Amino acid sequence: MAPPWVEKAPQPGTFRSIFKWGAKDRFKHPNPGFLRVIADALGLTKADFKAPSRLGDAVIENRAAFRLSSEDAAAFSAIVGPDNCFSDTYARLAAATGKSMEDILNLRAGRIENIPDLVLHPRNRGEIEAIVRLCHDKGIPLHVTGGGSSVTQGLACPRGGVSLVMTTHMNRVLEFNETNQTITVEPGLMGPAYEELLNRAPETFKADRRYTGGHFPQSFEFSSVGGWVVTLGSGQASSYYGDAGDLVLAQDYVTPTGSFKTLDFPATATGPKVNDIMKGSEGCFGVLTALTLKIFPYFPDAVRPFAFMFRSFGEAVTAARRISQTGSGLPAVFRISDPEETDIAMKMYGLEGSLPDRFMRLRGLSPGSRCIVMGRTEGEPSFSKNLFRRVKKTGKENKGLYLTGYPMKKWQAGRFSDPYMRDALNDFGVLIDTLEAGVTWDHVEDLYQGVRAHVKQTPGVILMSHASHFYPQGTNLYFIFITKMMGLANSRPFRPGSSKKSWNTTVPSATTTAWAGCWPPSWKPTSAKNRWMCSGP
Amino acid sequence: MAPPWVEKAPQPGTFRSIFKWGAKDRFKHPNPGFLRVIADALGLTKADFKAPSRLGDAVIENRAAFRLSSEDAAAFSAIVGPDNCFSDTYARLAAATGKSMEDILNLRAGRIENIPDLVLHPRNRGEIEAIVRLCHDKGIPLHVTGGGSSVTQGLACPRGGVSLVMTTHMNRVLEFNETNQTITVEPGLMGPAYEELLNRAPETFKADRRYTGGHFPQSFEFSSVGGWVVTLGSGQASSYYGDAGDLVLAQDYVTPTGSFKTLDFPATATGPKVNDIMKGSEGCFGVLTALTLKIFPYFPDAVRPFAFMFRSFGEAVTAARRISQTGSGLPAVFRISDPEETDIAMKMYGLEGSLPDRFMRLRGLSPGSRCIVMGRTEGEPSFSKNLFRRVKKTGKENKGLYLTGYPMKKWQAGRFSDPYMRDALNDFGVLIDTLEAGVTWDHVEDLYQGVRAHVKQTPGVILMSHASHFYPQGTNLYFIFITKMMGLANSRPFRPGSSKKSWNTTVPSATTTAWAGCWPPSWKPTSAKNRWMCSGP
C-alpha cells in the first residue's frame, strides 16, 4: 500500500505555497524500493505513513508587525511605484524564505520570523540606486532575493528592512556578444530562460551558432543567474565548464558608497581584482545589477554518457582522480556515489535484481561496497570523443566495470526532479538535509570516513555521499542525510548570524546549493491585499 | 662591417654588472637583416654604430647615505646574521634595480637612487616575521625582491628602508604532493630550478611520472616562482596552462598585523577568497613565504608546433579567435605577429628571399601586410593530437597558408635569448621598450590601430606588435618600441609613485612581464666590504 502522498497544488496564500519545492503542480515521491530502504533504516512502519502532517496549509494571516515609518514606506513606494511595493505578510515571508530545512520547518510550524517590512520589485538600476541611497541614509537593512533557492538562510532579514526581488523586472539581456563569446544580463534572469536564450541564439540574437551557459546547479530551474555568481554556485557540469566564479567576467554593482562596474577583459595582471572580490560576496558589499558571463558553443549531439562500477569507494576515488588528471580535459558531468548511495540508486533506477546486477555480483561487485562512477563528456565533438575514449580506457585500467551510458541516462532524467521528493518525505516526518565540502584528493577518504563515522553514531540515519565536482587537485564530498524528525516541538527557530559563512583561510565549505528552491511562487493569490505580482520569465 | 658589439662579461662591482640582462657571459645582437631594418627605420648610419657608449662600466663607489639608526641596523643584522645583512652601495643598488628601461638608463648614467638602506637575506619564515615586526614597530619601509626582473620599477625603495632578498635561502621545496598534483615551495625558487625539479620528479621526488609547472614567462630563466604570483605574470604557454594567477592554490603570508595561510582546496563556495585578494598584490599586504601551485603531467613528445601565414592582421585575428573558441582546448603557445613584426621575424629567421618567401609572395602574402600566426599544442598526447588537427583545419578554413612547424621551432630557439639584444642595442643609443594590454576580441583591431597611429606620429620608431595569450573571450596586445635615445641628458629620474598600478575597474593593464631581468647577479665581487653572497639555485 503506497502512503497517501500529497499530490495536490498548495492553496494560494498558504505557508505550503511558499516552501513547496518547484512547480506548484509537480510532485515526486520515492518509489517502493527506495521507500523500503528509508522505512527499514529509520525504523518506520506503515503507521508512520498513514497520514501526512504539518503540511503548512494554513493561509497566512496578515498580522506581522511593521517597523518602518510611514514616511519611509511611502518613499520606497514612490521609487518603485505602488504596484512593485508589498507590505502584506505573505509577500514578506515569501521574500525571506529559502529552501533550507530550517526554512521549511519554520513554515510548516507556522512561524513568521526574520521577514522584511517591505518587499520591493525594482524596475531598473536607477531605482536600485535610489533604494540603496535611502536605506543608507536612514540605516534601514537591505536584502536581495533572486531565485530564492538559498540553503544557507541567506534570504532571512533578522532586522527587518526591505528586500529587493530581482526576478520580476531585472531579468533582461543587455548585450549578446558573439565575437567575444559573452552575454551581459541582469541578475534576475532565471536559469532556464537564460539557457534557452543561448541554445536558441540563432533565433534570439541572429547568432551564427547555438550556445550554452554551461551552468546547471540542481536548483537550475528555480535559481537566477545573479544568484549563481553572488553565492559562487557550482553546476552539475562544472568539471568542464567551470564553477559560477569561473564564468563571470564582469559585474556591475550599486553600493552605499558609490556604483561601479568591472570591465570584461579576458585577463589582467593587476591585483587584487575587484571582480574577484565581489564574486561570492552574497550581497554584503552591494546590489548586483548586471553581469557579463562566458558562453560556450553548444554541441548537444557530442554528449557521450559513461558509467563504471567499482568494488569499493577507494578504488572509485582512485580511478576518478586518474581520469581528472590525464591532461585531456574533464568530463562535464562526473560523479562518484558511495556504497550507500549506489545501493539506493540501483533501487531507484529499478536495477536491483536485474541481469546486470546479477552479473556484477558474480564479478565481486557486491551491494554494500560497490560504487558507481558516471558522467558524460561534452564540448566540441572531436574533443568529447577523444576524452570519452580516455575516460573509458582509464576507468577500465583502474578496475572499473564499464556499464555503458545507461545509468547516466537514468540520472539525467531525474537530475532536476529528485528535490521534489523532499516535500513528500517531510510530510511524513522524514527529514532530509545536506552538507558539502571541497577536498583535496589526499583527504577524500579521511573526510568521507570521518563524516560517516560521526553521523552513523546516531542510529536511524541514511547517509548518501557523492562527489560531483572534479578538478585535477581534488573534488567535493556531498552528504545527504535522511532521518526521522524528532523533538520538533522544541526545535530552535533560526538565529540571526548563525549561518554566517567563514573565509577560506580556516575551514572547507560548501561548493554548491542543492535541494534548493523556487522563489517567487508562480501564481498570484486572488486577494487584492495579499496580492503577489510575480511575472518573471 | 659589424658594429663592435660588447661581448665581454661586465667587471664585478660595476653598474653594468647589475643591469646587464641574464647570464654575465652570454650575449646576443641583431643579425645583419634585423640591424638593417633598425638602421633604416631610425635613420642611423655606420657612424652611429662606431663605438658603444654609456656602458655603465664604472665601479660603484660606496658612497650612498645611510638613513637607519645604528641600533635598528644592528637589530636587523641580529635577525638574519651578519652574513645575510648588507649595507654597501652595490648591494643596495642591485636590490632596488629591475629591468625597466628607466632602471637601465639610470644605471647607465651612474645614478644611485631609490635604494634601500639595508639588504637582508632571510633564512626562514621566522626571520621574516621578526623583520616585519621590527619594520612595523619602527615605521621602516619594507620591500621584497625575487628574481629582479620587474619592468614596472617594483623594486625601487623611494623612502629607503630594508629590502628582502628571497632567492638566497627562501628557495626550498616544502612539499611535493603527487596525489593532488601540487607542489608547495618557498617563493625564492628560480624558474629553471623549479621546472627541472618537476621534469625530474621521478628522480627528485620518487614520483610516478614527470611533471611541468607550465609557466614560462620570457623572464623564465631569471624570475622566481613567488614573483610570478605576486605580479600575476603570464607565461608563453599560458593559453593551455593558465596565467600565474590560475596556477596558485594557496599562499602563506607574513603581514604587519599577523600571519596566515590560505588552504589548498581545489574550490570553495565562500567569497571573497583571501587567496584571490593576495594574488597580484605585489607585496603591498605582506611578504609571501610559501605557495602551493598546480603541476601538470609532462609530455614533451606530445608537443606539435604549427604556423600559418595570413594576408592581413584582420584575417590573422579572426582565425586565431576561431581557433580559441572551438571548445577543443587551446594551444599552449599561440601567437599572432603583426606585419611589422612578421617582416622582422622573416629577416631574423633568415627566411626573407627564401623559396618559401617567394612562394608566399606569389600567393599574395606580401611583406607589409602578411601576418604570421604560430604556436604549439601540448598536453596529453591524444588531446594534443586532436587539438593540433582542429587548429590546422580551422586555420586553413580561415584563409591561412600552413607553413609547417618550422617558424615555431625558430621562435622556440630564441624564446629566452632575444632579451639579450636589448643591451647590445642600448650600447649604441637604440632604445627598446614595451607596452601591453589585455583586450576582448571585438576591440583588438581598434586597439591595435589606435596604438600604431599614435606611435607612428613620431618618426623613426619601429613598432612590433603581437598577441601571445589567448582566451575564448580575447587576447592581449604586446607592443615593442625601438627608437633612438634622445635628450637623455634631460631625462627624468624615476619618480616614486609614478608606476602605481591601477585597478581593473578602470583601465586595461599589462598581463606579462617581459624584457625582464635577472637578480641577483650570479657572481661575487671580491672586495670583502662590497661582498655579495648570493648562492641561490
Image (cartoon, coloured by chain):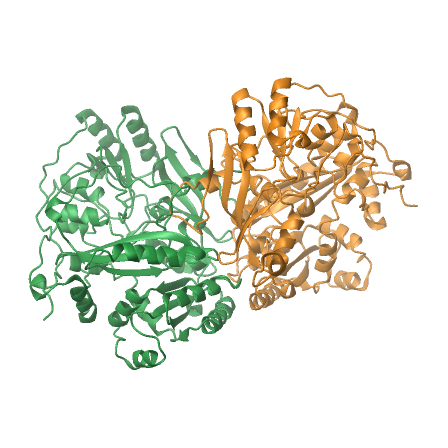
Chain colours: A orange, B green
> Relative to B161, is A340 above or below?
below
Q: Nearer the viewer, residue A245 or B179?
A: A245
Q: Residue at x 40, y 57 (%)?
A: B444
Q: Quadrant of residue A463?
A: top right
Q: Is residue B52 visible?
A: yes
Left or right for B323, reference A300: left
Q: Residue at x 83, y 45 (%)?
A: A35
Left or right for A389, reference B446: right
Q: Is residue B262 visible?
A: no
Q: Quadrant of residue B420?
A: bottom left
Q: Nearer the viewer, residue A40 or A422?
A: A422
Horizontal and vertical percent position of residue A511: 59, 43
Horizontal and vertical percent position of residue A14: 80, 31
Q: Nearer the viewer, residue B241 or A9?
A: A9
Q: Nearer the viewer, residue B195 or A287?
A: A287
The quarter in which the N terminus of chain A is drawn is: top right
Horizontal and vertical percent position of residue A307: 68, 61
The quarter in which the C terminus of chain A is drawn is: top right
Number of numbered labels in the structure image:
0
Outermost residue, right side: A1
> Relative to A504, is B218 above or below?
below
Horizontal and vertical percent position of residue B386: 51, 70
> Relative to A300, is B291 above or below?
above
Q: Quadrant of residue A437?
A: top right
Left or right for B163, reference A397: left
